[in-house]
Image: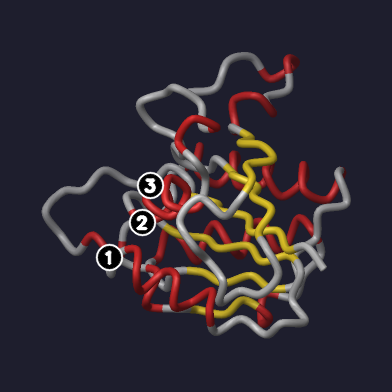
Amino acid sequence: MSRELWLLRHGKAERYDGNEDYDRRLKKRGKRDANRMGDWLKENLLIPDAVISSPATRAIMTAKIVCDAVGIDRQHIQMEKRLYDEGLVRVKSVLADCPSTFSRVLLVGHNPELEDLLTYLVNPIHLPDTEKLIPTTALARLVLPDGWTQLEKGCAELLSITYPKSLTEESEGSPD
């Protein structure tokens, strides 16, 4: 059975003002983009078996909005502190803990960890040539080999990266 890993960066958050980074909330645009991404997932029948989120406020807010849009009970969101500022090895350990029955896992987290994971799993020649691979509320979809524990360098295939700007409805005007 092939597996898909979906990497979703949290939505646009309040500017870091020297207070606790962990507690930054989503801005209006971040909420709107998270809702659009959730609607897009539902429209494309992309429903994850598991949603695993960083417990940082902006990430969990994003996860909740996406779950509401796709019809997943918020109580099924697994909060995982290893997704917040703990590096690539710790993020991979989160995936290694996933049951083999999961075929689609959505990780909601932060850069640089998500981009580090993406560039580790996918051969760099197959990635877009852009400064920021996963900007806020972007979703990268990867196909992985069997087993969540077999995550070797270059083992994944990038299916797509969906950016919130590409989901903008023309009738709404330009995003802020």
Label 3 belongs to which residue?
13
Disc 1 to disc 2, C-alpha distance: 7 Å
Q: Which residue is mark 1?
A: 85
**How many numbered marks have been drawn onto this rendered protein structure?**
3
Left or right: residue 75 versus residue 120 is right
Q: Quadrant of residue 91?
A: bottom left
Q: Choose mark 1 or mark 2, whichever is in front.
A: 2
**On screen, residue 33 above or below 78:** above
Q: Work out whether residue 12 or residue 154 is closer to the camera in this orientation and state it.
A: 154
Q: Is residue 175 left or right of residue 22?
A: right
* Residue beneath disc 2: 113
On the rendered structure, is 52 left or right of 115? Answer: right
Between 7 and 123, the residue placed more toward the observer is 123
**Is disc 2 surrounded by few (<14), some (14 to 19) or many (20+) residues within 10 Å?**
many
Q: 61 or 116: nearer the eye?
A: 116
Q: Name the secondary structure under disc 2.
A: helix
Residue at the spot x=61%, y=81% of the render? 98
Q: Nearer the viewer, residue 115 or 35?
A: 115
User: Callout 3: few (<14), some (14-19), or many (20+) C-alpha neighbours within 10 Å?
Assistant: many
Q: Position of residue 87 (x, y in %)?
A: 29, 65
Q: Is residue 10 visible?
A: no
Q: Amino acid at mark 1?
A: Asp
| Pointer 3 or 1: first along the chain | 3
**Quadrant of the frame with the N terminus:** bottom right
The residue sitting at 67% across, 47% down in the picture is 35
Q: Position of residue 67 (x, y in %)?
A: 70, 63
Q: Marks 2 and 1: in contact by CB < 8 Å?
A: yes
Dot 3 or dot 2: first in sequence order is 3
Q: Residue at x 50, y 78 (%)?
A: 79
Give yes or no for contact between labels 3 and 2 (Cβ–Cβ under 8 Å). no
